[in-house]
Image: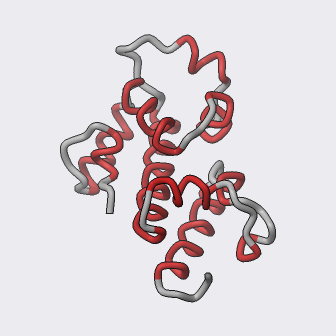
Amino acid sequence: MMEVAKLLGNSSDRPLDLIRLAREGVDKGAMLQVQEYLGLSQKELAQLLHLTPRTLQRMQDDDKLPSAASGQLLELARVYSQATEALGTNTLARQWLRQPLTALDGNNPLQLLDTPVGIQWVKTVLGRLTYGVYS
């Protein structure tokens, strides 16, 4: 599985280290790396982080995301990591995130990743996919 810490440019995947990272704020470079891995436009990323595209555009290289947006980015990285593990490649994970799924009532996973309930639902479907419940 692709480590979440690696996606975020952090040295550890330990839960307390990731909590600290979310509280202190993820830096712009790590945010851009997650955006690239997931194949998101700036507008899509802004929507998922509950920020405006303009806020993301104004970020300086040494700026950090607010705690809530950092926590959301952490969850996006975790979903992507789980999708990559379940599907085998980064490309398939990116495609899967944009594909409407019957298991998600016709929504594509990316549409649901802006809320905690949606994130959990997508993670549940990925878990079932991993164990062969959904194909």
Decide if residue 95 is on the left or right side of residue 65.
right
Please give the name of the residue rendered at 45% of the width and 35% of the height, measured from the top-left corner.
67
Tell me if residue 107 comes above or below residue 62 in the rendering: below
- Picture coordinates of residue 36, whole percent (x, y): 48, 36
Number of numbered discs overlaid on the protein picture: 0
- Picture coordinates of residue 35, whole percent (x, y): 51, 36
Judged from this view, the residue extending furthest toward the right is 106
Tell me if residue 25 comes above or below residue 38 in the rendering: above
Decide if residue 34 is on the left or right side of residue 134.
left
Pick the front one: 11 or 85: 85
Decide if residue 103 is on the left or right side of residue 129.
right
Judged from this view, the residue extending furthest toward the left is 11
- Picture coordinates of residue 98, whole percent (x, y): 67, 54
Please give the name of the residue rendered at 70% of the width and 60% of the height, measured from the top-left corner.
99
Pick the front one: 27 or 107: 107
- Picture coordinates of residue 63, whole percent (x, y): 40, 17
Please give the name of the residue rendered at 56% of the width and 74% of the height, measured from the top-left corner.
124
Please give the name of the residue rendered at 44% of the width and 64% of the height, measured from the top-left corner.
82
Quadrant of image for the N terminus = bottom left
Quadrant of image for the C terminus = bottom right
